[in-house]
Each structure stands twice: as C-alpha cells, then as structure tokens.
Image (spheres, rainbow, N blue to C red):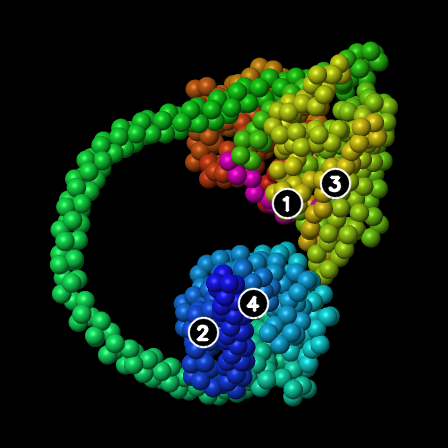
Amino acid sequence: MKTSLQFCFLFCSLLSFSQTERALIKKIDSINTIALSHYNDNDIAESFNLFNQALKLSDSISDNYGKSVANFTLGRIYYFMHETEKAKESFKKVISVSETTGDNYLMASSYLNLGKILMNIEPPTDAIEYFEKALFYANKNDVRDQFNNNQKEPILFETRINLCQLYLDINNTSQALRYLSRAEDNLSKIVDQGYYTAKWKLVQGRYFVAKEYYSTASLKFKEASKLLEKRNSIDIKDKNSLLSEIYKELSTTYDVLEKDSEAYSALLMHNNYKDEYFSEEKLKQNLIIQSKFSIENYKNAAQLANMDRLRQMEASNTIKNVNYIISIILILLFISLLIIYKSYSSKSKLSKMLKVKNEQLEIAKDNAEKSSELKSNFISNVTHELRTPLYGVVGLTSLLLKNNDLSEKDSKFLKSLKYSGDYLLNLVNDILQIGKIESQKIELKNVSVNIRVLLENLVNSFDYRLEETNNQIQIAVDKNIPEFIKCDSVRLSQVLINLIGNSIKFTQGGKIDVRVKLLNIIGDKVSLRFEIEDNGPGIPLEKQKMIFENFSQLDENSNTNYQGTGLGLPITKNLVELFGSDLEIESETDLGSTFSFNLNFDIDRTAKAEIIKTKKAIGEAISLTKKCKILVAEDNKINQIVTQNLLQRENYECVIAKNGQEALDAHKDVSFDLILMDINMPIMNGNEATKAIRDFDTEVPIIALTAADIEQVKQDYKAIGYDDIITKPFDNYEFFQTISQHIQRTKSIDKTPDYKLEKVS
C-alpha cells in the first residue's frame, strides 16, 4: 500500500512538472515571437529585453530551441548596432546549441551571418569556411524558419552571391563564376519582387568587369538599375543602397569605355541614391544610439537590482575569503617559485641544445647551397661540353646529306646519325628544361603565331621518324580559328613536339591525328582545344599518373624497348600548367591514347598587315649578291670546318680566328661585314673580344655563337655588345636568316650602292 502511494505521488509529480515545462516552452515561444515583432518594427531595446527574458527561461528548463531563436535574433541586433564581436559570439552560441536540435535554418543562417561579418575583416578568405558550412546546412531537406516558411533557396542564393563577391575581391574569377551560376539556379526558384534579380545582375556585372568585358558589364548594371527603379515594393533603404552601388559600378565601367557623358550621368545617379541612402542611414544611426541608450538603462536597472544582494553576499563572505585567499596566495607563490626555477633550468638546457642545432643547421645550409651551386655549374658545364661536339656531329651530317653523290645506303646511315645527334640534343635540352621549371625561371612570351603554319612545320620535322616507324600523321584545324593568335610559340611548340613524338615512339604502322578545335570566341579572346590521338598500345589506367613523374618509364618490365629519359611528358604537363590549363589523358589498353588540353589566346587582328608591311620593307629570307666577309671566332677545329663550309656554300667569304685575340687583330686589319663570336675561347674569350671591338667599331654586327644555355647568356648580351645570339647546334635556315637580316640592316643604314638584294634560292 505504501509503495503504491509513493508511485502515485511520483507519477503526479512528473505529470505536474511535464505540464509546467510545456507551459514554460509555450511562454518562451510567445516571448520570442513578440520580441521578433518588436525587432521588425525597429523597437530594438524592447526586443533586446524580451529576448534576454526568453534566454533566462530557456536556460532554466534547458529549452535549446528557444535559446537558439533568442541568441539568433540577439546576434542580428548586435550586428545591426555594429557590435560585431558580440554578434559573432551570439551566432556561435546558436550553432553550438542548434547542433543538438538539428535546426538547419538556424545553423545555415548563423554561418551565413558569420561569413558576412568576416568578409569585411582581413583576410576575407576566412569567411569562405563559414559560407561553405552555410551551404551544407541550407542544402538539407528541412530548412524552415520559426514561422514554418521554407527559406532554403533564399539562403542558398544569399550565400552563393556573397561567395561570388568574395572570390571576385581576391581575383579568383573561375570560382566566382561557379557560385554566380549556381546562384542563378536558386534565383529561378525564389518569388522575387526584383531585389534578388537586381543583386544578381550587379554581381554578374562585377564579374564581367573582372574579366575586362566592360561593354557586357555595363549592360548588366543597366538591367539591374531598371529592375529596382520601377519597383516600389522593395524596402526603400535596401533599394537606395543597391542602386547607389549599381550606378557607382556603371560610372566606373563607362569611364573605362571612355563614355564620359554616360559616366558622368551615372555618377550623378550614384550620388543621388547615396544621399538618399545616407538619409536613411542617419535615421538608422539615431535608432542605434537610442537603442544602445535603452539597453544600457536596462542593464543598469538589472545591475542595481542585484547590487544589494551582492553586497550582502560579499559582506558575509569577505572575512572567510580573506584567510582562504591568503592561503592560496602563499601556496601559489611557492608553486610559482618552483615553476620559475624549473623553467629557468629547462630553458637553459634548451638554449644550449638550440645553439648546437643552429650551428648544425648553418653547416647543413652552407653544404646544401654549395651542393646546389655545384649541381648547377656541373649541369651548365656538362651541357656546354655536350653541345659543342653535337654541333660538329649535326653540322657535318647536314653537310654530307646535301651531297648528291651519296648512295641510298649511305644517305640512310647519315640520316640515322643526324637523328641520333638530334636525340642527344633533345636530351640535353630536357635536362635543362626540368631545372628551369623547378627553379621557376620560365616566363611566357607572347608573339604573333599562325597556328596552321606552326603545326605544319612541326609535323614536317618528324618525316624521318614517321618513315622509320611506318606511321602517318593527319592534321585537322578548325576553319573558323583566327589566322593569327598571340602566344609563346616556343613553349607551345615544345608541348606539341613532345606529345607528337611520344605518340610516334609508342605507335608502329599506325595513325596519329593532330586536331585543333575552336571552343569559343569572345571579343579578342579565343579558346582552342588541342588533341593528339594515336592508335598505339594505350596506357593502363593504373599507370596514367605515373607517366607524368620525372624519369618514369612505361612498361619497364616488358620486352619492348622504348628509349627515352622519362622527362618529355612531365615537362609537357608543367608547360601546359604554365599556360593555365591541365593536360588530360584518355587511354585504354590496345585502343590507343588521346592527350588534350585547352588554351586561351588573344587574337592578333593586325598581324597579317604587319607581315605584309615587313615583307615590303625588308624582303623575305635574303642574301647579298656581292660576297660578304664574315669573321668566325671559334676555337674548336670541327666547328670551324662546319661553320666555314656552311657559309661558303651560301657564297659568303669566311675567315677563321682561333680565339678572341686573333678575332680582334683580324678586324683591326680587315673590315668585316659580320662577326660570329664563340663565347668560350682561350687567351681572350668572346665577351672580352666583343667589348674590345666595340671600343673602335660600333656598327659591325656581332652575333654570339654559343653552346651554352641561352637563358644564361641572353640576360646581358646587349650590354656586352652582341647584336644577337645563335645557339649551337642551330637550324640552318634560322642561322642564315639571322646573318642575312643583320648584314642587310647594316647595309641599309650605310646605303652602300654596291649591294643588291635578292631572294635566297
């Protein structure tokens, strides 16, 4: 009987407590609703007081939802009053509490507001994390506010438009476009009075400004202004603020487009709406001041109410606490002294250890720097020593191949020899290229290029390899691609040569397709897609990443011997990335491979006219009917023979000097039309000889003829006195083109009547 009575009493108590708790929750919800109404009516002080009451009640019964709602609007109140630190604190409380309630709307909105606050604080990129979390919670299924309205699309739109603006501020236009496009999808699902669309068009216009499409940007700003000006249902303060921003951007854009009158009109409209916005802002500031005053009064009243109670508690605890505090102070003092002593001992030991470590690191650093310098000097010297004999091999082979009396067998042997020399030269260049890429010494140079001629010349250079491997190459260039573009033709050629050479190497008796497709043309910009496809053995999926690693070899365990250093594709990948793109690969075993990449170029609309003008002015590859005297300063016997034979075959008179001193003496005795000066020579090197010649002759063209890395030479060759650089081994056509142009330039300046120009046969 007693047990039954206890059970009934407990049940009644629980029932009574449950009913009381439900009543308190209803009261909390009611206070939050009334407080929110006051907030919407700009009665900030009353709203603040009510939300604080709701917080206290929520804490008393652990009502997390009520606590989240109250903290969320308190955060908005603090943000409204420009108290950002308190606003951040309130929104973070909402997040920590809402994680237990699972309220996606409050989570997403709090992260969104935190992101907006951080956007205006350096660095703005700190806001990205919060915006991404806002997107995460807004993308969930149930995103409803306390009035059960679906807020999913508005929050997604607001978050993405802020992310777009943030990425524009840090000049990341690709990410900005991504969020701008997704915000447009959200916009289509929002019932809009014009404000959201105008805001989207404003940010879209800013994107086009960042891309320097100023005409398109001005159209978007005008569309945004028209949307707002004809709508009266939008909050006047928000409307004036947005219109002020739009006309400011429009005025700046017109100024860039040199539309002065339109820029001035837009500036007047900007100032007009800015003044109206400032009028509203003054009212807002007055409201903030009044609200802060009222809130302070509320806090003071609460503080006074508790003051007497606190005084009584302090008085009763003062005497008891004094002894307690003294005891604690003495204990802490003893502990502090002990900690200080141990800290001093530890720091002393640590200091000695660090000193030893620093000395070791300094030694290691010096050794590393010496090793790096030794490596660079070693590579530079070795490549120079390799290029010098290669010049003799390639040069002599080229001379022999021009002999019409060769048998087919001898001609084939010589072609093989020349291919081997070219292969060794490419190996040397690849090693140098990897070093430059790793040290980030490569810069792209924009010159005018005919993409069709470039491809034809590249493919023609593979004639021997195609004949050897029984392969065929087919070129396909979209007919709508502009004739001339601006790009770094050397780097682009290197990419294409590596990819075509790779396909030829791995394909026997097959077909290689080289395609250039037009992706789009916008203004003076063109986007092209390059594809090199072969029907070779293909590359297994698990090895497709490995082929882009330095010195990696495919099928190294197979019986097929694919020669190469394993540097071609890594260099190609790095160069494509230097252009701002990615090298893509599609391949399956036994079905061939396709390498592709997309590049953006400027269209050169004046190149054709300039070429015609240049041809009329200087003629195409030219020579002089009267024999020209050329002085060749070269210490290597084989190189002397090669260079002398090449010049004599083109009807030039050639004199050899074995070093810089002989070259200097020879030019003092005889006036030469041009000097080819090797840089590295005994007794007097090329640089010293060139400077000495320039002391008494500033007109004669002097061309540096060197096997050194041209990147190292070209930095100061003009200051030394050279007119140009030719790297050994050289292309014969470019060699004579360079010589002919410099001789012709000198003769045209001298206006010597004894010389007559004619085309080279």
- Where does residue 159 sit, x and y in percent of width and height? 60, 65
Disc 2 versus disc 3: nearer the observer: 2
The answer to whether 203 is drawn above or below residue 671 in the figure is below
Q: Point out the tag, 4 or 2, that comes first from the N-terminus.
A: 2
| Mark sitting on residue 106 | 4
Q: Residue at x 66, y 35 (%)?
A: 572
Q: CA distance from mark 1 to mark 2?
A: 62 Å
Q: Amino acid at mark 1?
A: Phe
User: Could you say whether the residue bearing mark 4 is in a helix, strand or loop?
Assistant: helix
Q: Residue at x 78, y 33 (%)?
A: 587
| Mark sitting on residue 579 | 1
User: Could you say whether the residue bearing mark 2 is in a helix, strand or loop?
Assistant: helix
In the picture, residue 429 is in which quadrant? top right
Overall secondary structure of the magenta section:
loop
Residue labelled with disc 2: 57
Q: CA distance from mark 4 to mark 2?
A: 20 Å
Q: Nearer the viewer, residue 407 or 153?
A: 153
Disc 1 versus disc 3: nearer the observer: 3
| Mark sitting on residue 596 | 3
